[in-house]
């Protein structure tokens, strides 16, 4: 079952590539100063994931103006994420859930990713969006079954306005 509205956000520590190389991002250390928007995507270098993160990168001010920090999470290794971000101009902070523990903790991991196309990569995160407030409570949760669908960013921004 996916993490749900009203529950405490499962804490995690993931790797990200900063200016000086690999760094750790601990959710609990990022709670308090702003709301957090966690965006899970199945895989780097894929069409819909690239479109989602490029559009968000272009419009990031809409989220920072609502006192929200946006981070992207995928099961790719951080070096692949960095290459993807550089190639596509993605400016979001990307977190690597390489072992799929966070996707599992949030209840959003595919058992088999795109089985109709014989892709059996279990553990890949479903495209999902979670807003975590300054107290660490999930205020918005959207988990999409189809990797081709995008989260409802109008509803996400409306919820962030309520929390601002």
Image: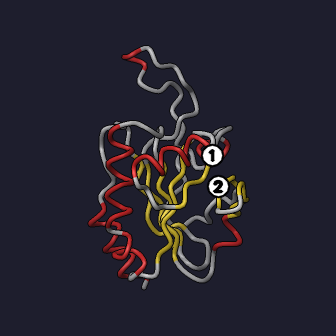
Q: Which quadrant of the figure has residue 117?
A: top left
Dot 2 alpha-carbon crowd within 10 angstroms: few under 14, some 14 to 19, many 20 or more: some
Secondary structure category for the residue under label 2: strand
Picture residue at 67% right of the left edge, 43% below the top: 101
Identify whether 67 is placed above or below 156.
below
| Residue where numbered disc 1 is placed | 78
Picture residue at 58% right of the left edge, 33% below the top: 123
Identify whether 135 is placed above or below 15.
below
Image coordinates for residue 69, horizontal then vertical, percent: 50, 72
Q: Which quadrant of the figure has residue 31?
A: bottom right
Image coordinates for residue 44, horizontal then vertical, percent: 47, 40
The label shown at residue 120 is none
Identify whether 49 is placed above or below 33.
above
**In contact (CB < 8 Å): disc 2 and disc 1:** yes
Quadrant where the C terminus is found in the figure:
bottom left
The label shown at residue 17 is 2
Left/right placement of residue 110 relative to residue 97 reads left
Identify whether 64 is placed above or below 27.
below
Sequence order check, earlier mark of 2 and 1: 2
Left/right placement of residue 10 relative to residue 84 reads right
Residue most extreme to the top: 118
């Amino acid at each position: 079952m996916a993490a749900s509205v009203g529950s405490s956000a499962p804490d995690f520590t993931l790797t990200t590539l900063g200016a000086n190389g690999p760094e750790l991002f601990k959710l609990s250390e990022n709670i308090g100063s702003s709301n957090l928007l966690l965006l899970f995507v199945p895989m780097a270098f894929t069409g819909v994931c690239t479109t989602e993160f490029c559009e968000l990168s272009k419009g990031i001010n809409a989220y920072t103006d609502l006192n929200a920090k946006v981070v992207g999470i995928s099961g790719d290794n951080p070096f692949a994420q960095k290459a993807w971000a550089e190639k596509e101009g993605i400016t979001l902070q990307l977190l690597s859930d390489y072992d799929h523990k966070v996707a599992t903790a949030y209840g959003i991991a595919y058992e088999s990713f795109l089985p109709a196309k014989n892709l059996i990569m279990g553990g890949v995160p479903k495209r999902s969006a979670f807003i975590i407030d300054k107290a660490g409570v999930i205020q918005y949760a959207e988990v999409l079954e189809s990797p081709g669908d995008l989260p409802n960013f109008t509803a996400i921004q409306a919820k962030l306005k309520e929390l601002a």
